[in-house]
Image (tube, helix red, strand yellow):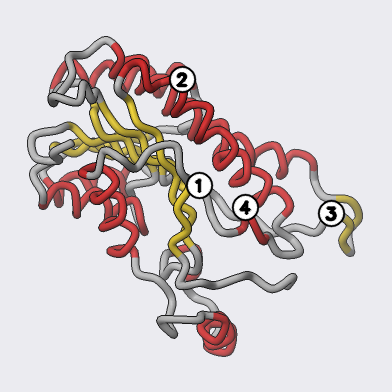
Amino acid sequence: MEIAGQVALVTGGGSGMGAETARYLAERGAKIAVLDLNGEAAEDTAKAVGGKGFACDVSDALAVEKIILEIAAEAGVPRIVVNCAGICPASRVVGREGAHDLALFEKTLAVNLTGSFNVLRLAADAMSKADPVNDDGERGVIVNTASIAAFDGQIGQAAYAAAKAGIVGLTLPVARELARFGIRVVTVAPGLVETPMLAGMPQEVYDSLVATAIFPKRLGKPQEFAALVAHICENALINGETIRLDGAVRLAPK
């Protein structure tokens, strides 16, 4: 699917990989809508790319539905949807203060897994009612963001790894179901990427993370994530797959 002229919806677009993806797609001619819990950050990103920003909790069914309807009415049905919204809390199942806080576990799943599915289901519904955009009968592509923690999560990542594994797990069945509408579903599982989640870490911690990289010997860049998203949009054969973007990193237990 050609990116130019399409409406692209990016969640978690106020910073990090989401903001870079919004910029990257805008440079290739997409019309951008940005969702972020931080409304000011969403608007800043959107303003920089000539798009529109929305403050939104992606796990809020009514809020997301309203925003997608508004985008469709003003700019057109989103044909590219990139789910980058997420949180990354760390907590042991049994720690110094006792058992893992259940509310924290539920919140992590609500934002990372339920939130991604909420946006996916509503965007797919809108896409399914729109006309195809090319001779393949393609109506859109949805790119979700998992993590290599879905495969080799570390101690303290039970909630985060479970949520990201859930995203990996839904990729193929949803791609199979939505194929009849010409909607592709793909997941990217980034490794260690220089984002606000990793900002402010001590130099020794940063160096230890870089040391785990096989090649290249550095952390990933948001631009590399955005470039992969763009390629997924343009390459119609990429569907129902989870792609690791990690420089061959395998996380140690801790």
| Residue found 34% across the figure and 40% down from its top | 82
User: Which numbered tag is attached to residue 177?
Assistant: 2
- The CA distance from mark 2 to mark 3 is 35 Å
> Residue 201 is drawn in which quadrant?
bottom right
Task: Read off the residue under disc 1.
Answer: 86
**In terms of depth relative to the viewer, which is nearer, 228 or 135?**
135
Image coordinates of residue 155 in percent, x first then y, are: 76, 64
Amino acid at dot 4? Ala
Disc on the earlier residue, 2 or 1: 1
User: Which numbered tag is attached to residue 150?
Assistant: 4
Q: Which of pointers 2 and 3 indicates the residue nearer the eye?
A: 2
- The CA distance from mark 2 to mark 4 is 23 Å
Above-or-below relation of 122 to 146? above
- The CA distance from mark 3 to mark 1 is 20 Å
Amino acid at dot 1? Gly
Q: Quadrant of the C terminus?
A: bottom right
Disc on the earlier residue, 2 or 4: 4
Disc on the earlier residue, 2 or 3: 3
Q: Which of pointers 4 and 3 indicates the residue nearer the eye?
A: 4
Amino acid at dot 3? Val
| Residue found 53% across the figure and 88% down from its top | 207
